[in-house]
Image: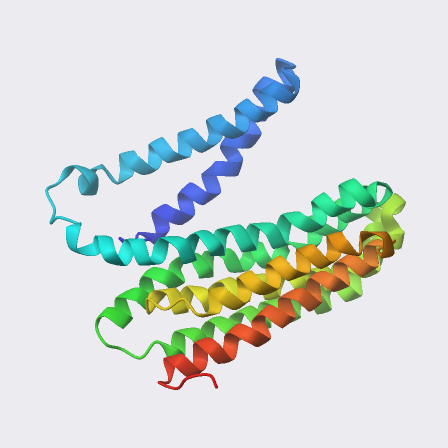
């Protein structure tokens, strides 16, 4: 990312699932190594991609360069916000699945079917979020106004999310009837889950632009809402009896997060403070 070698980044991202599929065929299917083999293939595929990345970047890692001592204060300042971003976004993704598997186990198959299609906007927008940080950081370092980056990111994210939601609202029922007839009753939940995942990606992009300016105010709101939402779902777990409630809760949680961080990031970027 820092070197802006996006072709290499995309190539390594595309190779990772290919290596995983090949190793899974070898160790799990043919050698029948079971769960241990499944963990081994995931670990091995990640190591292969990491080794390839280091090989392609050897010209950068082996040459002499200036000391990073002056950058350590900035790195230390960003460490906790970056950690919170990873923890909160992972928690928002994983908590619903853990909740369903522990308290609505009979709905696990339906959730898996919804996730398979509903995560598509997140996968489409992840490359954009990946390149946004180095581009916005480089522009901010030169004193450029990066508000257009934020506007474009939110516009593209919203457009992709809307397109995916409309598409799955129209085709999810016939698609499930042909592909997963056993889970046809869950088809109507694909499009709201698509909205949740699209909003999830937009949240990451908005906070990424804020990180590029070395500001970390939006992450506070994300942390508060994420913690409160997960605690509330667990606390009222006895009242949550169907998957529809979980899916719509995910939409509402992310909408609340985005409604909170957008004015914070936008107003501070324009030199204003939030009253």
> Residue 197's x, y, as percent?
63, 60
| Extreme-front residue of the structure | 235
Residue 5 sits above or below residue 25 on the image? below
Counting the numbered discs, the total is 0
Asked where in the image residue 88 lies, by quadrant, the reply is bottom right
Give left or right: position of 61 versus 173: left
Res 78 visible: yes
Query: Residue drawn at (33%, 38%), measured in percent from left and top?
Result: 53
In this orientation, which residue lies closer to the viewer: 36 or 30?
A: 36
Asked where in the image residue 192 lies, by quadrant, the reply is bottom right
Give left or right: position of 49 versus 230: left
Residue 260 sits above or below residue 93 on the image? below
> Residue 12's x, y, as percent?
41, 41
In this orientation, which residue lies closer to the viewer: 99 or 209?
A: 99
Residue 44 sits above or below residue 75 on the image? above
Query: Residue drawn at (58%, 62%), measured in percent from left and top?
Result: 200
Give left or right: position of 43 versus 187: left
Give left or right: position of 143 versus 265: left
> Residue 107's x, y, as percent?
84, 45
Query: Residue drawn at (38%, 64%), measured in percent from left and top?
Result: 211
Query: Residue drawn at (54%, 25%), measured in percent from left and top?
Result: 41
Res 23 visible: no
> Residue 133's x, y, as percent?
37, 61
């Amino acid at each position: 990312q820092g070197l802006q070698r996006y072709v290499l980044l995309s190539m390594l991202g595309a190779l990772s699932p290919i290596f995983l599929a090949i190793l899974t065929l070898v160790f799990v299917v043919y050698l029948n190594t079971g769960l241990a083999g499944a963990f081994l293939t995931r670990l091995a595929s990640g190591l292969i991609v990491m080794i390839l990345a280091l090989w392609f970047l050897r010209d950068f890692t082996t040459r002499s360069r200036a000391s990073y001592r002056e950058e350590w204060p900035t790195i230390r300042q960003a460490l906790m916000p970056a950690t919170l971003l990873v923890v909160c976004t992972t928690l928002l993704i994983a908590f619903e699945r853990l909740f369903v598997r522990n308290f609505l186990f009979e709905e696990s198959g339906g959730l898996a079917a919804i996730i398979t299609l509903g995560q598509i906007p997140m996968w489409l927008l992840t490359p954009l979020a990946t390149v946004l940080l180095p581009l916005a950081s480089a522009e901010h370092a030169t004193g450029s106004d990066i508000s257009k980056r934020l506007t474009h990111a939110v516009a593209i994210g919203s457009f992709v999310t809307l397109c995916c939601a409309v598409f799955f609202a129209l085709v999810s029922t016939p698609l499930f009837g042909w592909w997963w007839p056993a889970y046809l009753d869950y088809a109507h939940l694909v499009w709201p889950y698509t909205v949740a995942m699209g909003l999830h990606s937009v949240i990451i992009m908005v906070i990424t632009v804020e990180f590029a300016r070395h500001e970390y105010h939006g992450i506070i709101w994300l942390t508060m809402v994420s913690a409160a939402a997960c605690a509330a779902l667990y606390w009222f777990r006895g009242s949550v009896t169907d998957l529809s409630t979980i899916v719509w809760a995910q939409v509402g949680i992310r909408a609340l997060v985005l409604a909170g961080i957008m004015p914070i990031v936008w107003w501070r970027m324009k030199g204003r403070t939030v009253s």
